[in-house]
Image (spheres, rainbow, N blue to C red):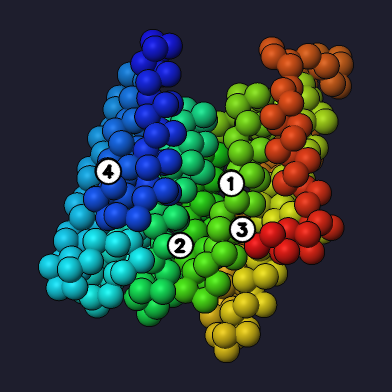
Amino acid sequence: MNPHAKLVASLSLLLGTTITISSNHWVMAWTGLEINTLAIIPLISKSHHPRAIEAAIKYFLVQAAASTLVLFASMNNAWHTGQWDLTQLTHPTSCLLLTTAIGMKLGLVPFHFWFPEVLQGSSLTTALLLSTMMKFPPITILFMTSHSLNPTLLTAMAVASAALGGWMGLNQTQIRKILAFSSIAHLGWMAIIIIYNPKLTLLTFYLYSLTTTAVFLTLNTIKAVKLSTMMTSWTKTPMLNATLMLTLLSLAGLPPLTGFLPKWLIIQELTKQEMTTAATIIAMLSLLGLFFYLRLAYYSTITLPPNSTNHMKQWHINKPTGSPIAITTSLSILLLPLSPMILTTV
């Protein structure tokens, strides 16, 4: 891809995200979302592979439909209340439409079909952007309008996302699809708590983004896109694969790793809100996700492939492991003891 085009797309991504997260007016928030959508499309389709082009078209159509719904919800609210302020969404129909639109933007069930396909058609770097940075503006809109969202619809979508994200990830062999369903399941955890404690949703999103970044950067280094590729990667980079195993277990939410913190706090908050049934269901559904994370961890570290050489370990890799991997991996494994300090900032 032309470096100038890549620079323009990257700067537009930053601009769109900044406009959306800093705006109070619905039209400005919508403009930021549109800039984001148009900026990521060249990055998705840059390989010119038919699957990449298909992914870009799917992404564009879904995001365009969601943006139309956002604009329609805000116009409907302005028509009835005279308010264009992001926090003044009070009309019931507008609240319902916005919950649906943001569900489409994020890929919550039942609007999740596009997300695994788009991730599968993208490169690992673009998939990382789609899983983390592109989710930030819609999450911010959810955060700003959390008091006026439809609680029944949102809770139903959240539990369905946690269930389907776990079920559908079980039989996948493509790592990007597994991480897409992992993202859907995590979004379920974020959506279920946003009405009761919006700051906890942001904390969950930050920690999820951190851990997912570590996983994608590691996968990009070892060039693994399928489970069969991971089986042979540990002989080249044993230490990197060992840390990948811990990062995946952190993503699954096992103590004493960082990923346990948001799940623990969400279950605690749901219990305080007398939603014990929802807390029990979503905790049980996280076991489905744990299964495929354990499978990924098993493939990355424990499977021994047939070796044609006499040497057990090949201590070489095409490029050195960078400091971003070291930093994100360390944070995604070791932050749990600092949870009291993290909670004071939240």
Q: Is residue 269 visible?
A: yes
- Give the spatial CA distance, label 3 vs label 4: 26 Å
Which one is nearer the viewer's eye here, 291 or 280?
280
Task: Label 3, secondary structure: give it.
Answer: helix
- Give the spatial CA distance, label 1 vs label 4: 24 Å
Q: Residue at x 51, y 51 (%)?
A: 183
Give, as a three-letter code, the residue at label 1: Ser
Question: How many neighbours does mark 4 have within 10 angstroms: few (below 14), some (14-19), or many (20 or more)?
Answer: some
Question: How many neighbours does mark 3 have within 10 angstroms: few (below 14), some (14-19), or many (20 or more)?
Answer: some
Upstream in sequence: badge 1 or badge 4: 4
For disc 2, the marked residue is 143
Upstream in sequence: badge 3 or badge 4: 4
Q: Which mark is residue 203?
A: 3
Give, as a three-letter code, the residue at label 4: Thr
- Give the spatial CA distance, label 4 vs label 2: 18 Å
Q: Is residue 52 visible?
A: no
102 displayed left or right of 227: left
Where is residue 182? Give x, y as percent.
Answer: 54, 52
Question: Please, is residue 43 above or below residue 3 in the view?
Answer: below
For disc 4, the marked residue is 31
The answer to whether the residues at label 4 and label 2 have Cβ atoms under 8 Å apart is: no
Task: Label 1, secondary structure: give it.
Answer: helix
Task: Label 4, secondary structure: give it.
Answer: helix
Question: How many neighbours does mark 2 have within 10 angstroms: few (below 14), some (14-19), or many (20 or more)?
Answer: many
For disc 1, the marked residue is 209
Where is residue 223? Give x, y as percent.
Answer: 61, 24
Q: Quadrant of the N terminus?
A: top left
Which quadrant of the view contains residue 33? top left
